[in-house]
Image (tube, grey):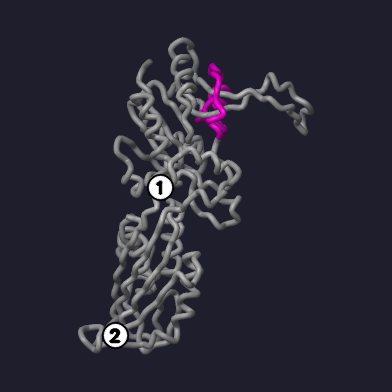
């Protein structure tokens, strides 16, 4: 057949998936690890093994695209929109082929026989969209319509193969759940092929067992270091680990100057391989002038958890001639435990001086060294 592009949709927040765990799990489904690669990359490789697609476009959250480039060889990325449909339209802007195959990353089990039926049908039948489906085997009842004829009902799946122009035109006419419903509503021709139970969508806790056929997450540990220093200026308090400490001076900084949290952010980003604090929150960006470093920490923690990491432990060394840190350590640990969503026993805070040597010894500022250890979330514990 003519050239075909592949679009993989993975920009969703996975709210139904996360809801099943009552806030205990923050990972997005598309970032569950198969060995050491994210699920969306695994899905892309499965499709690549079946067909030489002219282009593969992966749709992810805008905040994740730079990070995703680590696994991006042979792929193009685009930021998702507020809805699945907007995400698809964003991807279609990059597609220049007559046909496009669209699949949700959450349908990660690729059935090659279904793909074969789709591609064979595309050569034999003139259709605007070719759709896999399952027959309904149970009795169906609707509160509005009563009992329905199950022989007339089809359970629609992805991947779906569409004529690109027909799909773009249809998607601009309203809001739809998938490609086939949009094209059908726009008067296009739909052709159905037999689907597969293997194409079940990973939606909630109940179907975590679908992952059991795949490689378990890599058991490596990832360690990152962070270092930051701020000089003093006139003032009457400093912030360390989100705690306000009375002092004869304050920090000179673009944000609130919490040097400990800045160091910790760098350690977390370093362990995840996700850049540094300057790339995320530039001190030349007025948006972050006076920013609350606790809020910045929450953003980074949410990100590293979204992309598949658990925080194993944190170790922080505060280097200061003054003030005394020990009286505030327990309060700092409590605050950090809240920010990181880990128990306090996984957090260690140390304080030391430079024996009055150097600018720190002259009490001109404070430096902090942090170490963070991460590991991949093991989805086997989610069952």
Q: Residue at x 71, y 22 (%)?
A: 150
Looking at the image, is 79 positioned above or below residue 333? above
Question: Which region shows up in magenta?
Answer: 171-200
First in residue order: circle 1 vs circle 2: 1
Q: Residue at x 47, y 72 (%)?
A: 345
Residue 125, numbered label: none
**Mark 1 Cα shell of 10 Å, populated few (<14), some (14-19), many (≥20):** some
Residue 173: tell me if it is visible.
no
Residue 368: tell me if it is visible.
yes
Would you identify the image quadrant in which residue 313 lies? Answer: bottom left
* SS assignment at label 2: loop
- Please tell me which residue lies in front, 84 or 322: 322
* SS assignment at label 1: helix
Residue 62, numbered label: 1
- Please tell me which residue lies in front, 5 or 336: 336
- Circles 1 and 2: CB distance less than 8 Å? no
Left or right, 103 with reference to 153: left
Looking at the image, is 72 positioned above or below residue 313? above
**Quadrant in which the N terminus appears:** top left
Left or right, 110 with reference to 69: right
**Mark 2 Cα shell of 10 Å, populated few (<14), some (14-19), many (≥20):** some
In the orientation shown, which residue stands out farthest toward the top?
124
Q: Is residue 217 magenta?
A: no
Looking at the image, is 161 positioned above or below residue 36? above
Image position, residue 101 (x, y; %): 44, 26
Residue 353, numbered label: 2
Q: Residue at x 45, y 83 (%)?
A: 328
Image position, residue 119 (x, y; %): 44, 18
């Amino acid at each position: 057949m003519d050239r075909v592009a592949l679009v993989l949709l993975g920009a969703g927040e996975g709210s139904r998936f996360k809801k099943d765990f009552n806030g205990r799990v923050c990972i997005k489904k598309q970032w569950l690890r198969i060995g050491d690669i994210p699920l969306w990359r695994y899905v892309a490789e499965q499709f690549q093994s079946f067909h030489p697609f002219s282009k593969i476009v992966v749709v992810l959250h805008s905040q994740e695209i730079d990070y995703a480039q680590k696994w991006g060889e042979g792929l193009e990325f685009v930021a998702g929109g507020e809805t699945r449909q907007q995400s698809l339209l964003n991807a279609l802007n990059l597609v220049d082929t007559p046909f496009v195959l669209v699949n949700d990353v959450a349908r990660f089990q690729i059935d090659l026989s279904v793909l074969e039926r789709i591609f064979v049908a595309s050569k034999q039948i003139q259709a605007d969209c070719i759709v896999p489906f399952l027959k309904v085997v149970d009795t169906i009842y609707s509160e509005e319509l009563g009992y329905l004829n199950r022989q007339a009902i089809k359970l629609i799946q992805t991947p779906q193969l569409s004529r690109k122009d027909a799909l773009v035109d249809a998607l601009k006419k309203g809001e739809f759940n998938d490609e086939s419903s949009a094209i059908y509503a726009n008067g296009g021709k739909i052709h159905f092929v037999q689907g597969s139970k293997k194409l079940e969508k990973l939606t909630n806790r109940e179907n975590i067992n679908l992952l059991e056929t795949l490689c378990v997450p890599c058991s490596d540990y990832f360690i990152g270091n962070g270092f930051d220093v701020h000089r003093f200026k006139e003032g009457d308090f400093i912030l360390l680990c989100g705690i306000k400490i009375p002092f004869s001076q304050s920090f000179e900084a673009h944000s609130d100057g919490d040097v400990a949290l800045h160091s910790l952010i760098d350690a977390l980003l370093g362990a995840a391989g996700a850049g540094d604090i300057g790339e995320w929150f530039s001190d030349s960006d007025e948006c972050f002038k006076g920013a609350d470093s606790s809020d910045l920490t929450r953003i980074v923690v949410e990100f590293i958890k979204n992309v598949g990491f658990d925080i194993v432990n944190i170790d922080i060394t505060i280097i200061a001639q003054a003030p005394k840190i020990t009286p505030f350590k327990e309060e700092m640990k409590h605050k950090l435990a809240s920010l990181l969503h880990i128990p306090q026993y996984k957090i260690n805070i140390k304080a030391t001086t430079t024996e009055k040597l150097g600018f720190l010894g002259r009490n001109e500022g404070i430096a902090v060294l942090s170490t963070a250890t991460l590991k991949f979330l093991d989805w086997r514990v989610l069952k």
